[in-house]
Every structure is written in structure tokens, then in C-alpha cells.
Image (cartoon, grey):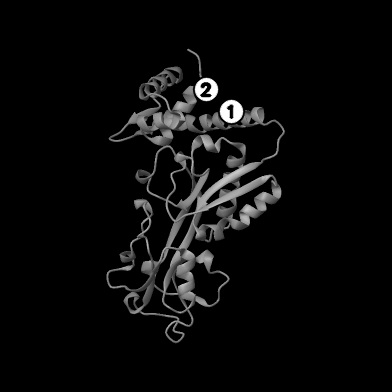
Amino acid sequence: MNFHWDDVRYFLALYRAGTISGASRRLSVNYTTIARRIRVLEAFVGARLFRKQASHYSLTGTGQDLLATFEAIEASFAHFEQQATHPGTALQGVVRISLSESMVRLVAPFLASFQQQHPAIVWKLDMTNEFVDVSRGLADIHIFPRLAPSYISDRYERISLGHRRVRAYVHRSYQGGRSRAPRAQDIDWIAWDTSQITDELSRRAPSALGPDSRIVAMASSGTATLQLARAGLGAVLAWDFLLTDDPGMIPLDLPEFTRNVEICLYALPETLRRATIRTFADYLSGKLRETEPS
């Protein structure tokens, strides 16, 4: 019985998707093909690689032992494919990124540093507060706070960009310069307006502030909510990285509104096989995780 590279692809697709139907969508092959090639691979190895549970497949001990080897095989083939397709060429082309205005502030320095290393790169940024379905070809990659696995297509690869803190801020000029508030319900709040957002996954209802919150303004832009807060209108929930150079904005001691949120890069596996996209995704992930607050 011969060993085939495609069987490794089927193994990794099933491991990452968790279901045979999900693996078949990832690879655009028939459901039965996935099941048959997994059986062939298990026969070659001489052991079961997956165990079927209530709603998904998980690795057996043997499957877990082989995972690193199969991922190394995948990486080697991807590297060979890149070299064969573009031998000796520098990274170049347009990289299309969909993200919010807030996320631009986080990633812009690394777009600049990466472009200095690869001057033939051109960035094309699509500003959006919604979760973008990259499988529709609207972007190469999408940067967005982490969503639960059941909420996203199992075709996506999700690469962690680390965690960043969100908490309540108010300007020094708010209510005569008061920098602290004993209770959330004592504060005037500036909330997200999601009425124009069509993607249900991206909705952040104003009521998330609490039923007793006094909302005095709403805006559909993070930049707009911060500008209103800077004018002294009220408090706002904001990423720490947006306010590191603004001494006028003061964090409020409200633990119920303080949380660390994981930010992720979403892309299709076939998109990540492009040398430019893969290299940039790894670069951005590495840099942001290096600078992740402790």
C-alpha cells in the first residue's frame, strides 16, 4: 500500500474542521472521498487516527503523535509549491485586508515595517465593522475579534494576533473633570449604533452596557464614539491601544466592563498558500503577539 500526500491533506482537513462534511467543504471534494482516504491512511499506518464523538471527530493517540509530522509535510509541500511557482522572486502584489478603523490603529505600524522589507507590496484596506466572509473573495484576509467556532465557516483558517484589553474611558472634562464614577449607572454612555449593520455576528447591542445604563449618544464608528467622549459627552468602551497617547482620556474602575479580547486574522487555506499572504500573516501574528500586554 502506497503513501499519498493527498491523504495527509485529508487528515489535516478533518482534524481542523472536526467533521467530514466540514473537511469536504475545505477541500471541495466529495464527502465519501474524505472518509475513504482516511480509511486508506489508517490502513497504511496500521492504527486508528480518529475517534468519532457525538458531533465531531477527534484525534486518537496515534493521530496526535502523527500530527506534527503531517503538518511538517504540509509546510514542506507549500514551500516547494511557492518556490516552483515563483522561483527567486520577491514578495509582491496587492494584499486586500478588511478591518475596522480601530484595527487599523493596531496594525498600521506593522504594515509599514513589512512594506519596508518588501517594497513591491501594495496594501488595499476595506474599512468595515462587520465580519467579512473572505470565501466570497471580498478580501484576502479579515482582522476581527475572535468568534466562537460554531459561528464561523469551517473553511476559514483563524490565526491568533494576541489579546488586547477593552475597558471604559472618560475624558477629564466630563462632569467637571470627575475621573472616577462609583457605579456604571451614574455615567452618561456613548454606545455603538449597530442599526445599519447587516451581519448578525457583528451586532453589539447598546443594552450590552446594562439595562440601567444612561445612553446619551450612539455612533456606528469607533472613531466617532471616541471623538464624542473626548468632547466630554460621556464614557465609552474602547481598546487600550487607541488611547495610549491620549492623556486626556482616563480609564474608569469598572471591572464589569474590563475584558481581554482575542483578535484574529481570518483567511482561506488556499489564500494562505500564497507566499505573500502566508509570510505577512506569520509576520503580523508574531509581531502582535510579541507586543501583547501582560
Q: How many marks?
A: 2
- Residue 146 lies, with reference to residue 170, above or below; the image says above
Residue 55 screen position, x and y as percent: 29, 35
Q: Give how far apart the Cα atoms at labels 2 and 1 are.
A: 9 Å
- Residue 180 lies, with reference to residue 112, above or below; the image says below
Nearer the N terminus, badge 2 or badge 1? 2
Residue 208 lies in what quarter of the image? Answer: bottom left
Secondary structure of residue under mark 2: helix
Residue 108 screen position, x and y as percent: 60, 57
Which residue was labeled with disc 1? 77
Answer with left or right where residue 291 lies relative to residue 60.
right
Residue that appears at 58% across and 49% down: 124
Tag on residue 277? none
State yes or no: discs 2 and 1 in contact (Cβ < 8 Å).
Answer: yes
Q: Residue furthest bottom?
A: 176
Q: Nearer the viewer, residue 230 or 198?
A: 198
Which residue was labeled with disc 2? 5
- Residue 80 lies, with reference to residue 39, above or below; the image says below
As shown in the figure, which amino acid type bears the numbered disc 2? Trp
Q: Nearer the viewer, residue 62 or 72?
A: 72
Q: Nearer the viewer, residue 64 or 291?
A: 291
Residue 81 screen position, x and y as percent: 61, 28
Q: Residue furthest right?
A: 88
As shown in the figure, which amino acid type bears the numbered disc 1? Phe
